[in-house]
Amino acid sequence: MKLSSAVLGAGAVKRLEGIGAESVVTIGKDRLTRQQLARVGCFNFVAAKNLSHLLVDLGVKDLRDLYERIAPADLVLPHLGVISLAVLGAAFEVVGVGGGNPLESWVRAHSEKLRTFDSLKHAQHREQQAAAAEKKSGQRRRARRQRQAHEIRVERFETRRAQAADSR
């Protein structure tokens, strides 16, 4: 791309040229640039940055370590969706991990049955909803028991007060 410093300004041109060289995906020691991802047809750079930030906590050494050690089910994280997973597949391609179809071979290597990532996310969401419903049910039962106990205490108090008033 021809960038004109006369039109854009020298600072903007320098910044734009630097963006092309900076790494967009950083997973362990592997750092991939926009150009490397673009060579395999990946242009989702926002998802690439998001993927990098989300994988920091997994403590992977590099993309090969992620491919071998981390299962797709472990990546069912908030803010990590199918687009980020597609970027991960592109990163596997760039590094040369996983053969001709690295994303599928990665999923097959970690599970006996091939499922879509979206179905994994929905399964986790259903489990979270079930846990939330159970918690809410417990809260309702506790509130009902507390209400009943309070009513019993109030009734006892009023009975004792009435008895004390009668004995005077």
Image: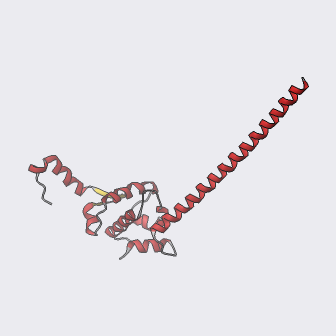
The extreme left residue here reads 6
Residue at the farthest right position: 167
- Position of 158 with respect to 55 (left or right) is right
Q: Is residue 75 left or right of residue 1?
A: right
Is 3 or 151 nearer to us in this picture? 151
x and y percentages locating residue 68 in the rendered image? 45, 68
Is residue 34 shown left or right of residue 63? left
Residue under the image location 16 percent in, 51 percent down: 13
Quadrant of the frame with the C terminus? top right
Query: Height in image: 155 above or below 3?
Result: above
In this orientation, which residue lies closer to the viewer: 95 or 142?
142
Picture quadrant of residue 44:
bottom left
Corner quadrant of residue 28:
bottom left
Which residue is at a point 82% across and 36% down the rendered structure image? 156
How many numbered tags mark residues here? 0
Vertical comparison of 90 with 145: above or below: below
In the rendered image, residue 41, in percent from the top left (x then y), is placed at 28, 69
Q: In this view, does 154 lie above or below 33?
A: above
What is the residue that sits farthest to the top in this orientation? 168
Q: Which residue is more in the foreground, 91 or 48? A: 48
Going 49% across and 66% down the picture, which residue do you hit?
Answer: 120
Q: In which quarter of the image is the N terminus?
A: bottom left
Question: Where is 19 relative to 155, above or below?
Answer: below
On the image, the x and y values in percent for residue 57 come to 45, 54
Residue 76, given in percent of the width and then of the height, sits at 48, 61
Residue 29 visible at all: no
Horizontally, residue 35 falls left or right of residue 164, namely left
